[in-house]
């Protein structure tokens, strides 16, 4: 894996100079792998790995400005196509996700603002539709823990490119004027919220390997280095949502490992979490306080919800200031829902009709669903949460159960700070629906295969 990490570091670096190498790599991987996964005997686990790798290029392609060759909304388009093909190919059926998709359709038929463009429609509609399709496709699919971890590695590779791009493009930190707002300079000159979402996700995934002592790169010090650098650069973006989401996933992983009984530890070969809690705490908190020192204490103030106005005494700290305006957007959406409780105001319409934060796109997917889809949006969310609660009894292994619940939680929580503008929510919620088999804790071996070669493999039992 070290070789392929280096390849993706170089891919992130050369993307600073020209988007062409990234575009070429993307399409070579896409078409060469699709030839393999389209075969009738390709197991679902291999098809899933292929999907995960390809759609994870969404953030780095945006940073490198590859549009129109790799479209800006590539993650939504490509995931939708992959999911439809997957549902047909593997003859997947499940009524609740199908009902979720149906709940979204009426709002497409009307627009109370008269201002919604086709792109507005796609921007707001495809995200929740992909969640429903992901639940339809992933639910009940059987995959070994070994193959799930290989899939996680394929997700990490493009995030390594994101990290490299941001690191190489950022100036020396002494030249950066850190304020109490999100920082696009340390985000590679791109949207800090989306970069932070990707880096926070990578921090969470790397931590899964690190805390369970499963092999990621094959070298413990390199695994720790990846964890530190993803955390450090994510914190430097000063965009809190993505990193808080990653830390939430980490907390859930630790909670379920810590709650394992001695019998479960022995039965599943789990790590004894006690001796790793302090190192885990030191790595995460040590990185936080290092960044806080590098930013002259601004990071801590940022995470405390302070703004330039509250520091100067011109503004009172409130829930809206702490959430960078998201609370007002949420309340504005709820006002629209109260006015149009049954069918809502139409897909993509809330930003045009909202009195509070008018013209600003929704950041909380739940409030957008209620405002634009009305009662049907509420039904959609209830079905989603019902499937989430079903995960609680989905696996006897606390390590695996913690991963599945954390995946679902990361997906849902991401939609509460970034709506569904990235691939993260649909993919994480989809992966949480998987059935993990043969998770008995035997030693995991190091993968030596390339991202493209992996689609030729079949799942290997642990």
Image (spheres, rainbow, N blue to C red):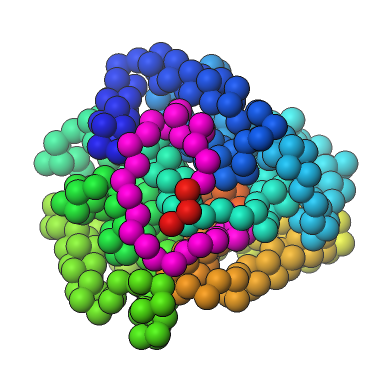
Res 406 seen here: no
User: Predominant secondary structure in magenta?
Assistant: loop
* Among the 4 quarters of the image, the one containing residue 452: top left
Q: Residue at x 62, y 36 (%)?
A: 42
**Residue 454 among magenta residues:** yes
* Among the 4 quarters of the image, the one containing residue 307: bottom left
**Residue 350 among magenta residues:** no
Is 266 above or below relative to 172? below
Q: Which residues are magenta?
A: 431-459
Q: Residue at x 58, y 26 (%)?
A: 36
Res 7 seen here: yes
Rendered location of residue 240, percent (x, y): 38, 56
Residue 294 appears left or right of 117? left
Residue 111 appears left or right of 283? right
Q: In front here: 20 or 183?
A: 20
Rendered location of residue 231, percent (x, y): 28, 53
- Quadrant of image for the C terminus: bottom left
Q: In front here: 54 or 281?
A: 54
Residue 114 appears left or right of 288? right
Rendered location of residue 298, percent (x, y): 22, 57
Is 14 above or below relative to 300? above
Q: Residue at x 78, y 44 (%)?
A: 91
Q: Residue at x 60, y 22 (%)?
A: 35
Rendered location of residue 404, percent (x, y): 52, 64
Q: In front here: 41 or 238?
A: 41
- Quadrant of image for the N terminus: top left
Q: Number of marks in the image?
A: 0
Judged from this view, the residue extending furthest toward the bottom is: 262
């Amino acid at each position: 894996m070290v070789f392929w990490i280096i390849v993706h570091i170089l891919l992130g670096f050369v993307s600073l100079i020209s988007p062409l190498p990234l575009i070429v790599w993307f399409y070579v991987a896409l078409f060469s792998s699709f030839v393999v996964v389209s075969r009738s005997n390709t197991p679902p686990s291999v098809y899933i790995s292929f999907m995960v790798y390809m759609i994870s290029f969404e953030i780095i392609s945006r940073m490198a400005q590859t549009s129109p060759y790799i479209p800006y909304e590539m993650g939504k388009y490509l995931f939708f196509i992959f999911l439809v093909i997957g549902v047909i190919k593997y003859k997947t059926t499940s009524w609740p996700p199908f009902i979720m998709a149906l709940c979204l359709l009426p709002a497409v038929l009307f627009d109370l603002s008269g201002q919604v463009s086709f792109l507005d429609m796609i921007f707001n509609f495809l995200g929740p539709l992909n969640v429903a399709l992901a639940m339809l496709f992933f639910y009940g699919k059987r995959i070994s823990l070994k193959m799930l971890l290989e899939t996680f590695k394929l997700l990490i590779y493009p995030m390594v490119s994101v990290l490299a791009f941001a690191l190489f493009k950022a100036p020396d930190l002494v030249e950066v004027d850190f304020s109490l707002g999100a920082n696009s300079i340390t985000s590679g000159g791109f949207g800090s919220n989306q970069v932070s979402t990707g880096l926070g996700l990578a921090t969470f995934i790397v931590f899964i390997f690190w805390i369970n002592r499963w092999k990621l790169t094959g070298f413990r010090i390199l695994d720790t280095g990846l964890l530190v650098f993803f955390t450090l650069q994510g914190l430097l973006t000063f965009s809190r949502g993505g990193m808080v989401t990653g830390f939430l996933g980490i907390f859930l992983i630790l909670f379920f490992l810590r709650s394992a009984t001695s019998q479960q530890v022995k039965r599943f070969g789990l790590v004894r979490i006690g001796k790793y809690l302090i190192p885990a705490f030191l790595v995460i908190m040590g990185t936080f306080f290092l960044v806080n020192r590098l930013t002259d204490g601004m990071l801590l103030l940022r995470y405390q919800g302070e703004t330039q106005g509250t520091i100067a005494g011109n503004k009172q700290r409130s829930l809206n200031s702490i959430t960078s305006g998201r609370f007002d957007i949420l309340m504005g959406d709820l006002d629209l829902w109260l006015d149009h409780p049954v069918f809502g105001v139409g897909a993509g319409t809330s930003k045009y009709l909202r009195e509070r934060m008018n013209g600003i796109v929704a950041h909380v997917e739940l409030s957008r669903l209620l405002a634009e889809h009305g009662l049907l949006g509420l039904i959609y969310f209830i079905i989603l949460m019902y499937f989430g609660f079903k995960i609680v009894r989905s696996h006897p292994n606390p390590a695996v159960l913690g991963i599945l619940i954390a995946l679902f939680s990361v997906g849902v929580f991401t939609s509460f700070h970034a709506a569904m503008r990235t691939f993260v929510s649909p993919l994480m919620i989809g992966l949480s629906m998987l059935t993990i088999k043969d998770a008995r804790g035997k030693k995991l071996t190091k993968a030596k295969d390339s991202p493209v070669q992996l689609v030729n493999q079949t799942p290997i039992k642990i």
